[in-house]
Amino acid sequence: MTTQPRARKQVLQEVNPFEMAQRQFDRVADLIGLNEDARQILRQPLREFRFQIPVRMDDGRLQVFIGYRVQHNDARGPAKGGIRFHKAETLDTIRALAMWMTWKTAVVDIPLGGGKGGVAVDPASLSRRELEALCRGWIDQIWRNIGPRIDVPAPDVGTTPQMMGWMMDEYSKLAGEYTPGVITGKPVEGGGSPGRAEATGFGVVYQIREAMKRLGLDPKQSTASIQGFGNVGQHVALAFTDPDILGGRVVSVSYWDREDRTAYTVTRPEGIDPRELIGITDEFGSIDKREAQRRGYLIEDGMAWLRKEVDVLVPAALEAQITKHTVKLISPKVKILAEGANGPTTPEADRELEARGILVIPDFLCNAGGVVVSYFEGVQNEMNYYWDRKEVLERLDRILTRSFHEVFQVAEEGGFYPRDAAYVLAIDRVVKAMQMRGWI
Ligand code: NAD
């Protein structure tokens, strides 16, 4: 039984995310009787780029990295999606993520399409100068095929606001004009939007709050357990425990220990202190477990987060974590599964969650906060006028709260599983845009 934590490379050998994304799409296409023309276009990306990025390394060697950009669909607006630097990145992971971006922008109804990019590299293995050369090299190869009206990248796993700053600078040099809107997730001092760093995690919690209203749960009495303690996991923990947002208790967070090359769960039954743990976590989301232990936290195995008797589980690490095997570890007490990560649940596990009546907030709705604030960043760049953090987060909350209830209304009216309902809504919007443009 596969219940041990696995590295992403191993996960990707077992589950091909693009096949998973296509299976989810096919299921809903069958449910709603989608016509063949729309299916043909939407099952595959519109455009795919694979390119070499030669980088002169610090020791004088030339190393050739492989970069990707996939534009799944741009019927509703420019393609939009992050760039990942991860050593297990493949064209198929990028295709899946690009496809999910199309549904994500459509389900929250912002005027953008779906894309994704990446490089198969462990960013922690490069020096700062090598990383900058790689970021600039990525732009040098693809700059003619991206732009504020074509395709707008952003950070994702393994990439940072600083890297977006270098990429924006490189594009602006090549284009011959300052073009902040070519990329989002930039540092706030360099055309970024306040609120972008916390947007995804806070957005997850805004929707957990709405789910609790539907289920009649008291947020102040609620508990959660989180997988992953990077950008998303940390901000979920902060918002979940913030009395002005939700005011619940987070009992566990898990993470991938870079030293031991395995995952652990850090637990404190009376509630973790997210700020304290963030203070002892590195920039890649790896917690200093000795220090955590010294401060009274319990260190458990990497799957312990999933076995906790809590109200809410938040996978916020990787794809394919909740499988037909691991789904059996989930306690009967769990009422909400809020998917902070992209693609954390396999289709087989979905059937089990559905049978058990767990309220699933599906990934491309649940973690859409990042892309919504990325969209706000592009809007502010175009206006050359910037909102403050409070305004950004209020606008974000309004969009996500509306989208959450739209999806759950479709689910109720059509008797759909929430993931299927989110697909129904998203596919319908993309198909209407393609029809309006005369593509089908
Ligand atoms: P990150 O790199 O900042 O953090 C990832 C975290 O997951 C780290 O704490 C890492 O230690 C942990 N991790 C890795 N493997 C693990 C394992 N086997 N078990 C437990 N923990 C493990 O990444 P992030 O930006 O927080 O993204 C997390 C997920 O959320 C990804 O699926 C990403 O695509 C998705 N997402 C991110 C954003 C965003 O704005 N950052 C937006 C939408 C979706």
Image: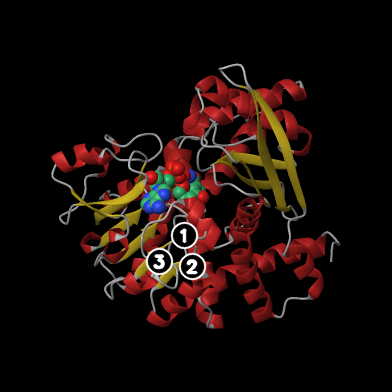
Q: Choose between 112 and 288: the one closer to the eye.
A: 288
Residue to which mark 3 is pinned: 2
Callout 1 amino acid: Thr
Colour treatment of the image: secondary structure
Name the residue at 55% across, 75% down: 410
In front here: 340 or 348?
348
Q: Badges 1 and 2: C-beta atoms under 8 Å apart?
A: yes
At 73% from the left edge and 60% from the top edge, which residue is drawn? 44
* Res. 191 visible in picture: no
Q: Which residue is mark 1?
A: 401
Say left or right for 25 vs 58: right
Q: Earlier in the sequence, mark 3 or mark 2?
A: 3
Check disc 2 and report its element: helix, strand or loop: helix
Amino acid tagged 2 = His
Q: Is residue 112 above or below residue 187?
A: below
**Viewer-proximal residue, 151 or 192?**
151
Measure how far apart labels 3 and 1 are at the Cα level.
36 Å
For the N terminus, give its image quadrant. Answer: bottom left
Residue 94 located left or right of residue 244: right
Q: Indicate which disc, 3 or 1, sits on the residue closer to the N terminus.
A: 3
Q: Tags 3 and 1 in contact by the CB under 8 Å rule?
A: no
Residue annotated with mark 2: 405
88 shown above or below 39:
above
Question: Residue 354: image x %, image y %?
Answer: 44, 78
**Is 309 rendered above or below residue 355?**
above
x, y percent for residue 64? 67, 31
What is the three-letter code of the residue carrying label 3? Thr
Secondary structure of the residue carrying numbered label 1: helix
